[in-house]
Amino acid sequence: MHRRELLGAGCLAGVTALAAMAEGARAAGAAKKQFLELRLYRLDAGAMRQRFEAFLTEAAIPAWNRAGIKPVGVFSPTEPKSDDLYVLLPYDSLDTFAAARGQLLADAAYQKAGAAAIDAPKDAPAYQRIESALMVAFDGVPKVEVPTKKDSRVFQLRIYESHSDLKAVKKIEMFNTGGELAVFRDTGMNPVFFGETLVGAKLPNLTYMLGFDDADAQKKGWDAFLKHPEWEKLKANPAYKDTVSAITNIVLRPAECSQI
């Protein structure tokens, strides 16, 4: 097989695998689970960041909403501090995900409102780069939730890496059917999303986001969670031993344009 054919076959296999996973979810009665894209826009401080937030507010978010992609979350990291922005995009299907860019580029209102960013010159780009992960939502949190809209709200993004696919599946099971999600909700650890990462960095991993009214609520929630008797039982269960090999923890504040 020639190199070009080999590459084409590899890409086709990847798309086929995602489609098969979606069909499997439907067959299991999970048809309403969303696919979640978490983008990280790499931005320079100052004018670039300000221009890009204006682009999201005036052009991108309204166009995503018109395409059925909502609510759109936009978040700025505070711990560790960064000028980058995370953007959360929920899709009702893989078809919606695949069609999204084409829909935006065919949207006349988007083209007009976002012209400066869409057609930015090479020496003054709208952003430096985009990093992206595609996830499928957990059974226990099948759709993006908006736990709070208080001005003081904070969010926590966590990535749990596993050293093997088997352990990654067990950790997801620990949340979905083992009872960990129930403990989260019982202690005020309010989900925004929980997702199994299909495509992205640090695989295999699961990624989730929690929302709190304020920093005090975040601290109280974790204190209550760590003391919860059901959590004590879960972490002592040998079935869930060594399911997580590394954790990334990022504290976020919502941008003004965020719908979450």
Image (cartoon, rainbow, N blue to C red):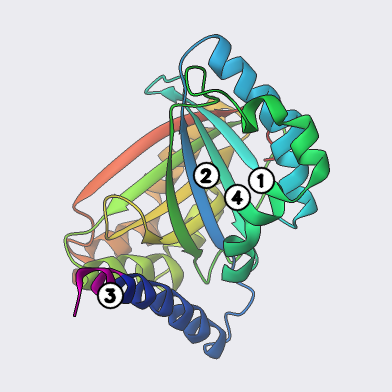
Sequence-wise first label, 2 or 1: 1
Q: Is residue 64 above or below residue 41?
A: below
Q: Can you identify the residue that label 2 sits on?
A: 210
Q: Assess disc 2: are there few (<14), some (14-19) or many (≥20) residues with their C-alpha within 10 Å of its C-alpha.
A: many
For the point 65% across and 55% down, the residue is: 102
Q: Is residue 136 above or below residue 134?
A: below
Give whichever of 73, 240 is nearer the camera. 73
Give how far across and how far down residue 199 sits, in percent. Answer: 37, 59
Task: Calculate the distance from the C-alpha at mark 4 to the C-alpha at mark 2.
Answer: 16 Å
Per the image, is 86 magenta? no
Q: Can you identify the residue that label 4 sits on?
A: 89
For mark 3, give the secondary structure.
Answer: helix
Relative to 162, is 18 on the left or the right?
A: right
Relative to 246, is 109 on the left or the right?
A: right
Task: Calculate the distance from the C-alpha at mark 2 to the C-alpha at mark 1.
Answer: 8 Å
Give how far across and how far down residue 116 sits, in percent. Answer: 68, 24
Residue 176 visible in rendering: yes
> Label 3 sits on what residue type?
Glu
Sequence-wise first label, 3 or 1: 3
For the point 61% across and 70% down, the residue is: 95
Q: Are marks 2 and 1 in contact (CB under 8 Å)?
A: yes
Q: Assess disc 3: are there few (<14), some (14-19) or many (≥20) residues with their C-alpha within 10 Å of its C-alpha.
A: few
Q: Which residues are magenta?
A: 1-7
Per the image, is 3 magenta? yes
Q: Can you identify the residue that label 3 sits on?
A: 5
For the point 27% across and 60% down, the residue is: 204
Q: Can you identify the residue that label 1 sits on?
A: 147
Residue 257 visible in rendering: no
